[in-house]
Amino acid sequence: MNVSAHIEAVYAEVCRRNAGEPEFHQAVGEVLHSLAPALHAHPEYLEARIAERVCEPERQVIFRVPWVDDQGRPQVNRGFRVEFSSALGPYKGGLRFHPSVNLGIVKFLGFEQIFKNALTGLAIGGGKGGSDFDPKGRSEGEIMRFCQSFMTELYRHLGEHTDVPAGDIGVGGREIGYLFGQYKRITNRFEAGVLTGKGIGWGGSQARTEATGYGAVFFAKEMLATRGEGFEGRKVVVSGSGNVAVYAIEKVRALGGTVVACSDSSGYVVDEDGIDLELLKGVKEVRRGRLSSYAEAKPKARYSERGSVFEVPCDVALPCATQNELAGQDAGALVKNGVVAVAEGANMPCTPEAIETFREAGVLFGPGKAANAGGVATSALEMQQNASRDVWTFAQTEARLASVMQSVHAECRATAETYGGSADDYVLGANIEGFLRVAEAMTAQGVV
Ligand code: NDP
Ligand code: 2IT
């Protein structure tokens, strides 16, 4: 069989059967187009039609989320949970609350999650969910009522051995608290392992809040180390200013780098002294404000609503906001300014054109399913603590996170080389390694 032609046929069929879902096509395309060497080496996976089967979610749930706003007016949103693959463990992946959420976005995120979770080596399947609810400008009461209504439907699909959500864009510790409270009330069970990202005092893990941002920096550190370099003295640009971005900034600073710029969906701020983390946390986490008020509080910093944060010269770029935020033109600007490494803290932030630009320029590129795996890996560590009714220290948990990121990095390089690529081809390594782990389990478990 001509493997490349077969892959093209599978991809065309996925696009046809999932019309109008461009992000899902993009995520599937990226994985499928890495798989030819793996399918050559493993004809049994071709025979078992693993690629075709893994692109079809095991279950997709779409539901109405009615709630009442502060003015007493009924509101309605749409809720989603796509349970993509349980080959390696219970469905695992975050919930996103953002007005842009639709089925195609949830499917792209769920698909990425399958291979990311496989790379962690921690027995978790892949899933994702969320809603087109927009939390911006909503009161505490509205957020709580929305979360309660969302969970009133979602709870029947969850369970510590079935499906375990966590946070993502628009869902942090506050929302997980309200979701957990409602789950507990409906089921009359304190089932700690049903959600991750919980508060430290009631089943949460130390270092889960920090894990995605820290993990992305650990991954970038490993990439730099392959060239005998590190973060010390390096200029770094981080996009976004949410959970992932804030803790990426914190870890870059701890490793001696300087984060000179970060952003939100309205604009970006440049602070050549290095982003003031206490000020940023105050603006974003405490007051839930806009990044523009960072510059108001610090006149030396420059805030801009025009152009892109990736035009700011840097040695390392960490896109930590959202999908397709870094396009070909941004990649061109980064390369022109001499960027050495790019690691994706967000899911699929770089467009295919941007990735190609980095590849041609020899820039080290860490794809999200490897570079941001630290968040979900630490969620799996939270599940371990819940299952054993144990509580680990921050240092213990961070050390496990660091070692997971080191192995993900090393395995991507080794697999890329085994399958005929350069060790620097993290895209090839991550896609093949993630796929092989899932394919092996799917084959062993039969046609289910
Ligand atoms: P947050 O909601 O905490 O922060 C999101 C940040 O991204 C905000 O600064 C937000 O700006 C910005 N942003 C969101 N949408 C857009 C947009 N359309 N254009 C430009 N900026 C945008 O989310 P997280 O930090 O948790 O998530 C960030 C990324 O990391 C996502 O891709 C997520 O899937 C991924 N991720 C998250 C993990 C986690 O553990 N939380 C784990 C692995 C990956 P604004 O406030 O203006 O909306
Ligand atoms: O994209 C991701 O990996 C997450 N949002 C975290 C998922 C999780 O279950 O911790």
Image (cartoon, grey):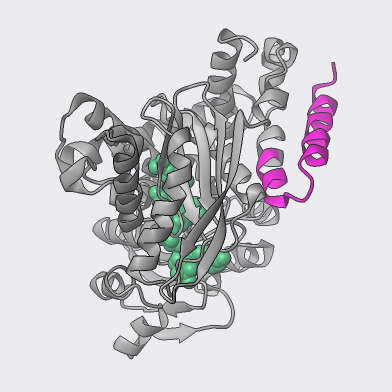
Q: In this view, does 201 lie above or below 137?
A: above
Q: Please tell me in which quadrant of the rendered image residue 187 appears.
A: top left
Viewer-nearest residue: 351 or 157: 157
x%, y% of residue 357?
Answer: 67, 55
x%, y% of residue 31?
Answer: 65, 36
Q: Name the residue: 56% across, 45% down.
A: 109
Is residue 415 a member of the stretch shown in magenta?
A: no
Q: Name the residue: 42% across, 41% down.
A: 165
Task: Please give left or right for residue 12 compared with residue 88 in the image.
Answer: right
Viewer-nearest residue: 422 or 300: 300
Is residue 24 a member of the stretch shown in magenta?
A: yes
Q: Is residue 374 above or below residue 20?
A: above
Q: Is residue 332 above or below residue 6?
A: below
Q: Can residue 240 be seen in this view?
A: no
Q: In which quarter of the image is the C terminus?
A: top right
Q: Name the residue: 38% across, 26% down.
A: 122
Q: Name the residue: 39% across, 56% down.
A: 244
x%, y% of residue 242?
Answer: 39, 63
Image: magenta residue range = 1-28
Task: Please give left or right for residue 385 compared with residue 36 in the image.
Answer: left
Viewer-nearest residue: 194 or 196: 194
Task: Please give left or right for residue 437 compared with residue 60 in the image.
Answer: left
Q: Please tell me in which quadrant of the rendered image residue 29 appears.
A: top right
Magenta: main secondary structure: helix
